[in-house]
Image: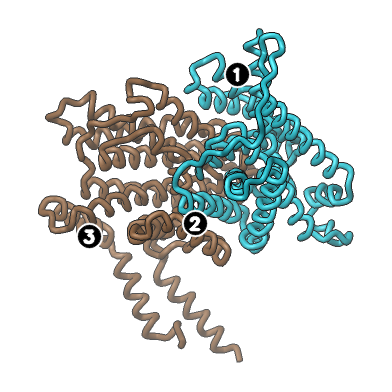
Chain colours: A brown, B cyan
Amino acid sequence: MNRTGTAYATWRDGWRRFTARKYFWPAVLACGLAFSIAADRYDFVDLYVQLIVIYVGINIILTVSLNLINGYMGEFSVGHAGFMAVGAYTASLITVHVLPQSVAAVGFPVAVLAGGLAAALIGFLVAIPSFKTRGDYLAIVTLAFGMIVKSILENIDAVGGPRGLLGMEKLTTLPWVFFWTALSVWVIRNLVYSNYGRGVLSVREDEIAADLMSVNTRQVKIIAFVVSSFFAGIAGGLFAHALQFINPRMFDIIKSTDVLIMVYLGGIASLAGSIIGAVIYTLLLEILRPLGIWRMVFMPLLLVVLMIYRPRGIMGLRETKLFEPLGDLVTERLWRKTKKEASDAAP
Amino acid sequence: MAYFFQQLLNALQLGSIYALIALGYTMVYGILTMINFAHGDLFMVGAFFCFLLAVYLKLSFVPTLLLSMLGVACLGVIIERLAYKPLRTAPRVSAIITALGVGLFLENFTLALSPYPKHIPPLLTNVTWTVGAVSISSLQVLVIVLSLGLMLILDFVVWRTKAGMAMRAISWDKTIVPLMGVSVNKIISLTFAIGTGLGGAAGVLYSLAYPVIDPYMGIMVGWKAFICAVVGGIGNVRGAMIGGFILGAVEILVAAFFPSTYRDFVAFTLLLGLLILRPYGILGRPQPQKV
């Protein structure tokens, strides 16, 4: 079958022109937001399904933000759960202890934002060792950071120590999850295609060459770590208020491994891949729930097989056109036409 | 003072087990530049082999140790052949993720088969000697002496035998060595067998010293052993031993003089400090980056 046939090309051009319209993304987002508000308000979606969707959204935020460091910047960070813990504890402390009960619902976005900012501050501190150490040694730094966060939280009695923290109301609703998920994907997508984002990619490809080409690698690393940890903190705040209970053990190395698996399952350096990875992993774990513990045996096997046959993950290093900056449709059509003529001219 | 020596002995015991596991990480890294994150779980499998052999077959200590080492070594070679070999030319990070996946698989498979923590029966009669105010148990001496013996044998293999020379050659230059008539696949299998076999031995010794085992015990110990390997300079066999003893000493001494909940915090903070001072580990050499 000739996939470059005229009908297909016309259809594809039409679809691309449609998605390239100025109002395409605002319309999609508005529909999504309206649907999530309606689902939350009128409960026409099963509560269990709502909860799963909330977890999917939180996992998308985590995966997309970790992809910024592990995929786009090419480092190997193993401490993402640590940032999440900082965000979760900060946000929960604000809603439980700082804000009075009556304004908790209104103050929730502020609390989540504060969680994100606290995590971003910590992310800034973790970025400093990354100036000198790279690769496996930076992996150790992030790993140690994750363990230190967990062990500090276990030793502070004011936040419940190893018993954990409870008393949060169920403030994480579908609209908020939708809002933060869309925001994180939007911000990271814009960052990646901005000048700074090109700097992040250049650090992955060759740091020394990037330095010589006057990329400020330190600044780039700080930006990547701060943005990534900010959204991890946001995800933590949402997670805490969805589950209404947190303890330090939830944010240990197993949680970080989960996020890593979602990133590499979906594919590094790909936003679409991150979303696919997070959705597939979260949903598969739910669908296979009847298998009990055997699903946890099955999932790693799936991952190993996937890595052997598709080492870069499902979407590795590729992106859907939807997330790419709008190309010049005319140029593209001309290019395709020239290519077609060249292939027709060839015997 | 006696308290200090007592804790030093405990530190030696824990440190020698860490060192045995760290050796597996560092050997595999030296030869494949790949971090085998499943190694901590192979250590756990070693402990479970010990449980099976000791409880169901009622074997005594020496055959249990040898059979567990053999079993874990075979498992390590099989994992290398099935999961890591197809990825030798793939990007490094996919090999790491595969290793994480294999580790998760081992943990959860063991958990599915044995959901409850198991208690290891005492395989040896434990005798306690008292020297001054310090009491020394025969088990501690056994763990320390056996680990040191295994490390000496390994050191001999790596530095004095032909296979060891081939290992060092492969870690030096992977493209030239096959041209010199060295069978790279065989040497890699051998490295995996030795490294994971040492991990299995560590599993047996650990389960004798701390006799309650569960499927998730390998995670924390594995990551800590990995830290030992990095502190010593990853890829460096002697560095891994030093790193193991350092971390063992730090953990035990912190737990001895502070509340024991601060153990991980202080250990990891020290690790961060050390990495900032010597980013390539104690015995590691900074590798010049080529432009």
Nearest the viewer among A30 and A254 is: A254
Chain under callout 2? A
**Label 3 element class:** helix
Q: Amino acid at mark 1?
A: Leu
The residue at which mark 1 appears reads as B253
C-alpha span from label 1 to label 3: 62 Å
Residues indicated by labels 3 and 2 sit on the same polypeptide chain: yes
Q: In the rendering, which numbered label is found on residue A300? A: 2
Residue at the outermost left position: A42
Q: Which mark is residue A27?
A: 3
Say if labels 1 and 2 share a chain. Answer: no
Estimate how packed mark 1 is, as few (under 14), some (14 to 19) or many (20 or more) residues with alpha carbons within 10 Å: some
Image position of B98 (left or right of B32): left
Between tags 3 and 2, which lies in front? 2
The amino acid on which the numbered mark 2 sits, given as a three-letter code, is Pro
Q: CA distance from mark 1 to mark 2?
A: 37 Å
